[in-house]
Amino acid sequence: MSGLHKLEIKQLRILSELLALQNLSKVAQKIGLTQQAISEQLKKLRDILDDRLFVRQGNKMVPTPRALALEAPIAEVLVQLEDIVKPEHFEPATYQGVFSISATDYATQALLPEVLSIVRAQAPSLKLIVQDFASDNVVELMSSGQLDLLISFPDFIPDNLPYELLFAEQHLCVASRQSSLNQNTLSIADIAKQPQLVVSPSRANLKGSHDQWFANIGLKRNIIMSVPNFSSVPDLLYATDLIAFFPSRLLPNNKVSILEVEALPPPFEVIVAWHPRSSQSKIHQWLIEQLRLVSNQPRTMALD
């Protein structure tokens, strides 16, 4: 006979929290049970599911492959169970809570001002915490509940996170509005020779996202400076003879001009990602919908 008749809702919650926190005492404190009670429930789960589920390594409980495979379906079941006791209709105007978003410097400028405007108008009791993008510990932050949404690029997120494409963005070649380069149409070879500034948010080095595009046609870029974010680029270009590839959604900007070039690098995708357990969350769905709406609107505001 199936072990389903032995399974209790509290055991699913314990398993979900153990997967997130990987520590018995932390789970006990969060749920409000003793550590011994958590251990007893874990023993029952091991018997029901016929798997060790977790292996102790010091103070850490390391999940087995079987436990990891259960994370997403258990999270979905718990969300559905929570929905049973919640009001059927989600109303942003009365929602109260704190929501954490990790966003790149680009996403913070291109999307969040408009999203915050919507939040203030439609969900005034919702509070947002925006964190710097940190690719090294995204899974840990999402699993522990410290992070709710991630706005980034597909290459920067783990494969096990569900995500939605918001839009495709195009880098344009820009220089100071006073640059003499504004008078001509530039070839790719011309661009490669020019002293360039690149944005390297995750690694401090003189490498840019379009290096391979130049290399594919036998050219090497003349990169002489890198910065960690896009917000400083217009000021630096305005004061120098440098050029840069700059996202179109952050333009126009009164300190730089768009250069006429014979070809542009391939576009890049901007996505929003979340933890599997949040796929049915009403507040997640609402915020993703606002991001979707903002993404489909052209950006016309100049950045000073």
Image: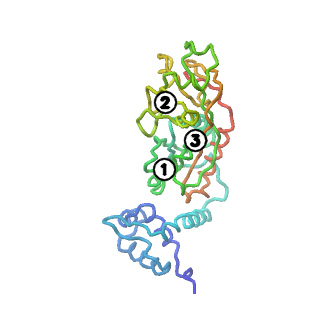
Position in image of residue 114 (x %, y %): 61, 35
- Residue at horizontal 52 percent and vertical 49 percent from the top: 157
- Residue at horizontal 41 percent and vertical 35 percent from the top: 205
- Residue at horizontal 49 percent and vertical 71 percent from the top: 66
Local crowd size for mark 1, using a 10 Å CA cut-off: few (<14), some (14–19), many (≥20): many
Q: How far apart are marks 2 and 3 (CA)?
A: 38 Å
Along the line of sight, the residue nearer the viewer: 178 or 39: 178
In which quadrant will I find the N terminus?
bottom right
- In the displayed image of the protein, which residue is found farthest to the left? 58
Q: Mark 1 points at which residue?
A: 147
Q: Mark 2 points at which residue?
A: 198
Local crowd size for mark 2, using a 10 Å CA cut-off: few (<14), some (14–19), many (≥20): many
Position in image of residue 244 (x %, y %): 53, 26
Position in image of residue 171 (x %, y %): 60, 31
- In the displayed image of the protein, which residue is found farthest to the front? 218
The reply to whether the C-beta atoms of the residues labelled 3 and 1 are less than 8 Å apart is: no
Judged by depth in the image, the label closer to the viewer, 2 or 3, is 2
In which quadrant will I find the C terminus?
top right
**Residue 271, image quadrant:** top right
Q: Is residue 292 placed above or below 264 in the rendered structure? A: below
Q: Name the residue under label 3.
A: 124
Q: How far apart are marks 3 and 1 (CA)?
A: 20 Å
- Which amino acid does the dot numbered 3 rest on? Pro
